[in-house]
Image (cartoon, helix red, strand yellow):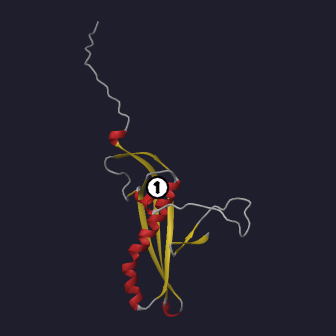
Amino acid sequence: KMSVSVAGKNKIVSVDIPEGLKAGDHFTFTTRGKADIDKVIASTMPTVPGMEVVSSKPIVWATVTHAFRGSSYDQTRMGTGIGSLLQEAQAKILEQVIDAKCNACLGMTFNITNDSSGEYGNNKVVIVTAVGTPSIVMPLVQQHAVVATTLPVTFYNQ
């Protein structure tokens, strides 16, 4: 992993460094923007109405954590901060779905765990784990339909 600063904002990203490079060498890489993630269907349902699952891949998961030294104020504030942790975990999963060349993540579940340790339990950590199945879905109208007609046939005993 490496730290990158883009437009004054630091972000830690995982990058495959080309073989043969040594310290001080330069290389370029691209990262995925939020627009790509917005194209992926994310659902807690096993299927999406009006769509058919045509392929699925092994499950993916992502975990995000937030640690803080807890006063009662911080604990109350953390209750409203869970949403951002859920969004971050979902975004990490959707990046994996794109890497798997899928357009949907189905059956998503989220688990929120907290732990208190240290003297008087003041050291707090909140762990959010998200799990889902990368899938390829297609609208039913795009499926190759087979149209068949039948005619009644009368059979006679001979």
Residue linked to disc 1: 133
Question: Measured along the vertical axis of the image, is residue 88 above or below residue 80?
Answer: above
Q: Residue furthest bottom?
A: 120
Query: Front-most of 94 and 155?
Result: 94
Mark 1 neighbour density, 10 Å: few (under 14) some (14–19) many (20 or more): many
* Image spot of residue 83 (x, y percent): 38, 73
Toward which corner of the image does residue 1 lie, by quadrant? bottom right
In the drawing, does residue 80 fall left or right of residue 122?
left
* Image spot of residue 48 (x, y percent): 35, 51
Toward which corner of the image does residue 25 lie, by quadrant? bottom right
Question: Measured along the vertical axis of the image, is residue 133 above or below residue 15?
Answer: above
* Image spot of residue 58 (x, y percent): 52, 53
In the drawing, does residue 60 fall left or right of residue 45?
right
The kind of residue tagged 1 is Thr
Q: Residue furthest top?
A: 158
Residue at position x 47%, y 51% in the image: 102
In the drawing, does residue 59 fall left or right of residue 137?
right
